[in-house]
Amino acid sequence: MRTCWVIDHPAHFQLFRQWFREDDILIVTERQELDAMLAVGFEQPTLRVERVIGNPLRRLQKGWRRQRQVTAFLFEHDVDRIISKGAPFELRAAYHMVPERWYISDTEVNTTAHKLANPTHILLPESWEGKLKPTHTYPGILPQAYVPLNSSAWESAKGQVQTEIGVPEDDLVVFHRKLLGGGIHDGDEIVNYEQAIRKMKVHFVENKESAAAMDGSAWELPVQATLFDGVLTGSTTLAAEAVVQGVPTLLISKAKRGFLTYLSDQPHFFHWNEDDLFDGRFSKMANDWIDAMRTARSTGRTPIVDVTQSVLNELFG
């Protein structure tokens, strides 16, 4: 089946790339990391569309512009199906043009997109906690379909980061990515944790979207995170990618997701979802996370393995 893949986020590119065929087409949002990821070279016809952010009216205006662009693009390139993760306007554009319109989501709070999408197929995780009803499901979480479950990479790299930044080998070094809140649904989920983490007895290495775009590391981001003792972030996507690979991860975010509930049983995942970071409960969680990093150094890491990838292979072909 000739497919149109809608890529609105770096993680979507990581996920979908494994199914690209030569005669497929791509719709890719304009954002720094996606620019860098496209630069490696793709032969498929590609349409770039603006990112749908801003106040509700602004988002609607941008969305309708995207829809018109996509309609024209699809007139030029006949496809059998379109697959979109959380981006509804492309599916609306394809309504009378593409027989199969797949909508994937793992973000329960994106209810507006769910209502706008008008798909023929709805693919949701088994952990889904929202009102949208699936036509198909997959177990686990989507990073399990694209991140490499190779704990030996970290085993061989232990101490390497410490050497590079000039700290003692026994010191803990943490991969830190702060969420800026520019997305459609994440503004209300941000917790200001800067002051609370300053006294933690770890070394933070900051990773920013702009840096990944500049140094060409956007494709390697999920693997980069595994080279550190742990991850601290406000991003649910990065948290999931790290936890899947067995990395002790502290997510500080008010986000509620079914896949976070799914991950909550993992002893190396810690999720703080409140504004108050100056009480004993947060200190205990932070200390438990630090202990988990030290334990992983001596006992190794345990990636999470399930059949998400094989289920998607069966569905997408």
Image: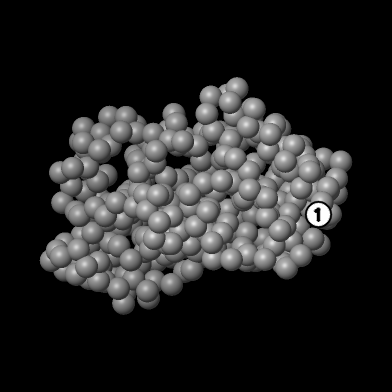
Along the viewing direction, whichever of 165 and 229 lies nearer the viewer = 165
Q: In the rendered picture of this protein, how many numbered marks are placed on residues?
A: 1
Along the viewing direction, whichever of 36 and 102 lies nearer the viewer = 36
Is 279 positioned to the left or the right of 225 in the image? Answer: left
Is 109 positioned to the left or the right of 296 in the image? Answer: right
Q: Name the residue at 29% across, 65% down.
A: 296
List x then y, in percent, for residue 221.
43, 59
Query: Which residue is outermost to the left?
Result: 168
Colouring of the image: one colour
Task: Say whether residue 83 is visible.
Answer: yes
List x then y, in percent, for residue 69.
72, 41
Name the quarter where the N terminus is drawn: bottom right
Give the structural element (helix, strand or loop) at label 1: loop
Name the quarter where the C terminus is drawn: bottom right
Mark 1 residue crowding within 10 angstroms, few (<14) / some (14–19) / many (20+): few
Q: Name the residue at 60% across, 22% down.
A: 57
Give, as a three-letter code, the residue at label 1: His
Query: Which residue is outermost to the top?
Result: 57
Q: Is residue 238 above or below residue 271?
A: below
Q: Name the residue at 37% across, 74% down.
A: 153
Is 252 positioned to the left or the right of 297 in the image? Answer: right
List x then y, in percent, for residue 312.
67, 60
Is 132 positioned to the left or the right of 245 in the image? Answer: right
List x then y, in percent, for residue 276.
27, 29
Task: Say whether residue 126 is visible.
Answer: no
Along the viewing direction, whichever of 288 and 230 lies nearer the viewer = 230
Residue pointed to by mark 1? 77
Along the viewing direction, whichever of 191 and 12 lies nearer the viewer = 12
